[in-house]
Image: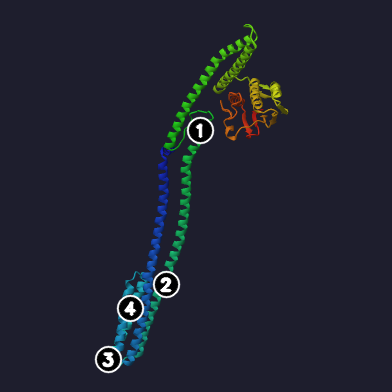
Amino acid sequence: MVCSLQVMKVKLSILFRLFLGYFFLLGLATCLSVYVIVQLGRVIDVTRSIILVDNSLMSHLKDLTDTLLSETRCEKKYLIEQDSSLYEGFLKSKGEFEHYLSEARLLDITIEARNVLDNIADFHLTYDALFQEEADYLKDGTNYNKEWYAKEKERAVNAAIEELVKVRLLSQQGIFYKVKNLSEEGTRSRAISIAVSAALLLAGILLVVLITRSITQPLALMQKKTREIADGVFEADLNLPSPPEIGELAQAFNIMCRKLKEVDKTKSDFFALMSHELRTPLTAINEGTNLFLEGKGGEVTEKQKKLLTIVSEESNRLIGLVNSVLDLSKLESGMLNFNFARADLSPLIARVVDEVGPLAEAKRIRIKREMSDLPALSMDTERMLQVLRNLMGNALKFTPRGGMVGIAARRLDNAVMVSVSDTGPGIPKEHEAVIFDKFRQVPGSTRLPGTGLGLAIVKHIIQAHGGTVWVECEAGGGSTFTFRLPA
């Protein structure tokens, strides 16, 4: 199952990943919106219920109370004055009372409130029947018990008023509970909305991070691979669990690496072959030139000696170049044999300083040595001499007359640090990263003899010894080449 998910993840394109992410966020936002809409609908329903039911019921209760009191006033005056207009006023108030009561019953009220309204109707009917009996007695001129009728009517009216008060209290209580529930729902809705919004925000951030990481992480690996290619590492090992677009680009990178590796191998083989083939005739030319200079081929004039000297120097220079190319080709292919043995570095440094002493005196360059007690190292002494000669030779070559070249060696933790400094023109910052590449020279230094292979050979030899080499410099302030070897 995990493998299937991983395969599915790899096959998802960038566009589809973004679509899924936005769809997920949109779904969460839609759910939140639906919830808010539902809650607003409930708020509207409760508000409408309070306005259309409870407020209307309260209004009808007030009208019922007023009309009932109006009935009692007309009834009492009619019994005293027996005026027909008062009787008509009583009937009018009675009709209004029944009208308001019927409207109250039509409202969407509770069963308890409806039962109370029925009680009010019964008490009102009782009151009305009692009054009608009194009115009939008055018309017929019959004597009757007025006190009993007055007491019964008063009891019926008071009972009706009490029931009206009860309905009012029930309505007020209903409004209170509705408002209370509305407040609780609002508080709950706000908490849920905040929680969902926070979850939505966190999910959005997490989703953005995951989608961005799934895109930027393979791009970072490709960037790293690009740097490796720039450093001459052409291994086609770029395998990215990434979207198809970037995966195809990674495969193109691998194809490019294989092609570059083939081209680099072809170039190295060509240099090695040509260097090997050139070394024999160049050696023959150099030896023949030396024989002519020694007079083995007959008497040589001064002019011929000058020409032969130039030929000898240039042939030696070509032989050195060929040897450097051969050494670098063997180093890059791993075919150069190293003879590692425990040895002291101090005598090698002293030897190289003595070797370059005449050149330093000719340019009036002072050589400064700073040595400390160094432990024995596992190294190939001949190759280490080659490193020291290259670094010291470069320092003397780029140091102007009257300058100074320094070489320092010290122990640092479990390593030995060797630095070669000069007071030459220095190396611009933009060239420090490539100065150790083969056939690379600092612009402006091409007027000085060189092949651009010395530092590349130094780098490979130091790396073969398990060490590192770097340069620290400022344009116009000299350079310091340092290598570190494990002790």
Q: Is residue 191 above or below residue 53?
A: above
Check disc 2 and report its element: helix, strand or loop. helix
Q: CA distance from mark 2 to mark 3?
A: 45 Å
Judge depth for marks 2 and 4 and give the one in front: 2
The residue carrying pointer 1 sits among few (fewer than 14), some (14 to 19) or many (20 or more) residues within 10 Å by Cα, namely some
User: Mark 1 or mark 2: which comes first in sequence?
Assistant: 2
- The residue type indicated by label 1 comes to Thr
Where the N terminus falls, by quadrant? top left
| Residue indicated by mark 4 | 122
- The residue type indicated by label 2 comes to Gln
| Residue indicated by mark 2 | 172
Q: Is residue 31 above or below residue 479?
A: below
Q: CA distance from mark 1 to mark 2?
A: 79 Å
Check disc 3 and report its element: helix, strand or loop. helix
Whether the residues at callouts 1 and 4 have beta carbons within 8 Å, the answer is no
User: Mark 4 or mark 3: which comes first in sequence?
Assistant: 4
| Residue indicated by mark 1 | 226
